[in-house]
Amino acid sequence: DAGVIQSPRHEVTEMGQEVTLRCKPISGHNSLFWYRQTMMRGLELLIYFNNNVPIDDSGMPEDRFSAKMPNASFSTLKIQPSEPRDSAVYFCASSPTGTGNTIYFGEGSWLTVV
Amino acid sequence: DAKTTQPPSMDCAEGRAANLPCNHSTISGNEYVYWYRQIHSQGPQYIIHGLKNNETNEMASLIITEDRKSSTLILPHATLRDTAVYYCIARRSGNTPLVFGKGTRLSVIA
């Protein structure tokens, strides 16, 4: 199994530019999660989807952030416009349906906004 | 989800068992105890989870007290590669997210 695949792995962009992070969940998984990790705030949940439907986006910091899941095998997290304080590692994770199910994480996208 | 409390850091000698405690005194009946770890610069890695009974897999053992208010993750023979931040999380059953705390930074020392 390929695991959760994220791209790009590293991105450096200028303030004000649009950033799009991509995630391919594990095949057959019904839930998808986006997290952000910084030194100051640790690992924070941004948004999660069940069966492609957003369930809780209360962790999305501002209107500059948006996430979509157009189908079961693809999700995007977009930041527009980006700011230096958005610099962080963004993790995507997925899990199958069921009680006591396990969530699997990708290797993250390292974003630096200068 | 119930709050969990973990010591901020621990040391363990290489080859010895690492016992990482976690307190979850307000855990509810439908919440599982999950353990993940994060090695520097990598995504969180699933270790083990349990509801009531003790669990063991190829990575670790999970001991849950009878009242379910605390648990211990045991790495039976710690190696330098086990140096990481370990997170104990109480999570409701179903398609719910993990809520991470600060975890325990385990340093395995040669």
Image (spheres, coloured by chain):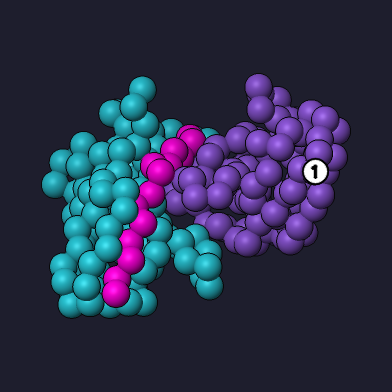
Magenta stretch: residue A110 in it? yes
Q: Colour of chain A?
A: cyan
Residue A111 in view in this figure? yes
Q: Closer to the camera, B109 or B22?
A: B109
User: Quick one: SS at disc 1?
Assistant: strand
Horizontal side of residue A19 vs A47, given as left or right:
left
Return the residue at label 1: B109
Q: Quadrant of residue A65?
A: bottom left
Residue at horizontal 32 percent and vertical 48 percent from the top: A9
Residue at horizontal 40 percent and vertical 44 percent from the top: A107
Start and end of the magenta stretch? A101-114
Q: Closer to the camera, B5 or B1?
A: B5
Q: Colour of chain B?
A: purple
Q: Is the N terminus of chain A in the top left, top right, bottom left or bottom right quadrant?
A: top left
Residue A90, position in %: x, y?
37, 57
Query: For the residue carrying disc 1, how many other residues have a C-alpha within 10 Å: few (<14), some (14-19), or many (20+)?
Result: some
Q: Closer to the camera, B106 or B50?
A: B106
Residue B51, position in %: x, y?
65, 37
Q: Closer to the camera, B67 or A22?
A: A22
Residue B91 in view in this figure? no
Q: Amino acid at mark 1?
A: Ile
Q: Is the C terminus of chain A in the top left, top right, bottom left or bottom right quadrant?
A: bottom left
Residue B37, position in %: x, y?
60, 44
